[in-house]
Image: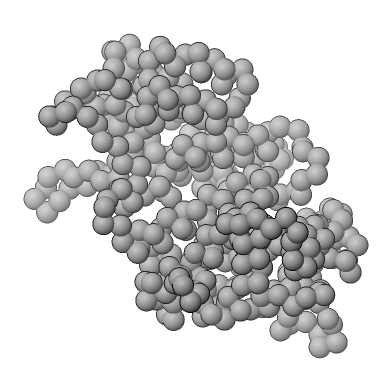
Amino acid sequence: MHPIAIEKYLEQLREIKRRGDIFQAFPYGAADAAYEDATVEIATLQLRKILELLAFGFVLATGEKAITSYRSFAKYKNPKDFLAKIQKLNKDYYPQPIIQQKNEKGEMHWSHPTTDKYLTPEDFDILYEHCDRVLEPRRVGTLPIPLDQYKAANLRWYGKIIRLLDAHLIHPEGDDVAYLFQMGAADANPTCSPFKLISENKTFKTSWDNNLNHSDVTPADHLRRQLEYLRRSCELYDAGHLDEAIRLAVAIRVLMHDTNNSESLLQQMGVKEQVKLVTSFGLSEKLPKNFQPVSIFPLFASSNEGGTTTPFPIPTPQILMSVNDWWEEVVWMQKSTLTRKNIILNTANKEGGAHVQTAPPEIIQELRQGLSQVSSIKVNGVEVGSPDNYHLILIRQFAHELLNSESLSALAK
């Protein structure tokens, strides 16, 4: 890496650090922009500027051959296309985050965080679209998302950026030196330390997830992978790609569904009887006995009081169920009475997750049509009509429950 490129990269990191200071001043109340919408927008703008600074850092790590791709990105703002082009030019273009820890002998040991902890290349594209949803003119046809949800997402994304950049390695293709960049303390400038590669073939082995790149992949590794699929698809769903719910259905099926020919992941791990899952559909127990709900779904029960949005909050205190009870719990009551199992399997098997059925069964048709007995609802106090493709909304909520089930996430650690 040329000394000029190193200095320019450090310059990018210094500006990222300054913009991080600005970002942190807004969510924690040290600064505001007179009203809440503008405050959220200013914080979100810092995230997008950080992404743009990172993008130029990819160019510095790749060399002059990447400049044309960067110019296209700067003009058309298409991060997915930009990252694909950079990947072809330099497979090691992306910073590799490391965790520095001392062992019992006081020796420094490096390890890599799992992909759910830091901003991955896939996250880069999702976060860029998240920023667009906040900063660009409101899109027609999308349900409004509450500011609290945007603020929580911003903090989560910023934490991932910190874990990516705090200490990371850059290795330009063809170089026999890897460069360790460290952000340093709050009042310090970022630093660079070169390390000579000593392997015989001078190759630099990246590890995006050190838990998944070994030949002896464990069941816990597979569980981490499936939960990461859920998390990533949830981010895409919330960015407006509602059909990501179909991929959510496939991941949930892998975790839960047993047949005569195959076992679910939880069954293979031998923990299916012990795991407790969160449910957010316990509302029916609180409804009047003479009330026949069209769906056990808090969105509609609370719509007259200002409404909510998906995913709606987990009840407090949490309601926990066994895996089998959660899988068989009724969550839809209209023409058909459906459980999570019915909805997940029909969506995964008939809607394009694992198979496609061009003439869908009646259950899918009913879910696609939405609620025939409800003409309009409110979401966050805004009249939005009755949504269709109801199964996609429900599946997003199922994923939210799984990601908030502590006994499940504990198994993946």
Q: Is residue 252 above or below residue 29?
A: below
x and y percent of residue 111 in the render?
A: 25, 46
x and y percent of residue 13 in the render?
A: 40, 26
Task: Name the residue located 42 percent from the left edge and 74 percent from the top edge.
Answer: 267
Relative to 234, 169 lies left or right: left
Residue at the farthest left position: 105
- Residue 222, visible in the rendered structure: yes
Q: Nearer the viewer, residue 159 or 110?
A: 110
x and y percent of residue 21 in the render?
A: 48, 34
Task: Name the residue located 17 percent from the left edge and 48 percent from the top edge.
Answer: 102
Relative to 170, 327 lies left or right: right
Task: Name the residue located 67 percent from the left edge and 38 percent from the top edge.
Answer: 134
Q: Is residue 77 above or below residue 116?
A: above
Relative to 102, 269 lies left or right: right
Q: Quadrant of the C terminus?
A: bottom left
Location of residue 140 by image quarter: top right
Task: Name the residue located 61 percent from the left edge and 61 percent from the top edge.
Answer: 348
Location of residue 303 by image quarter: bottom right
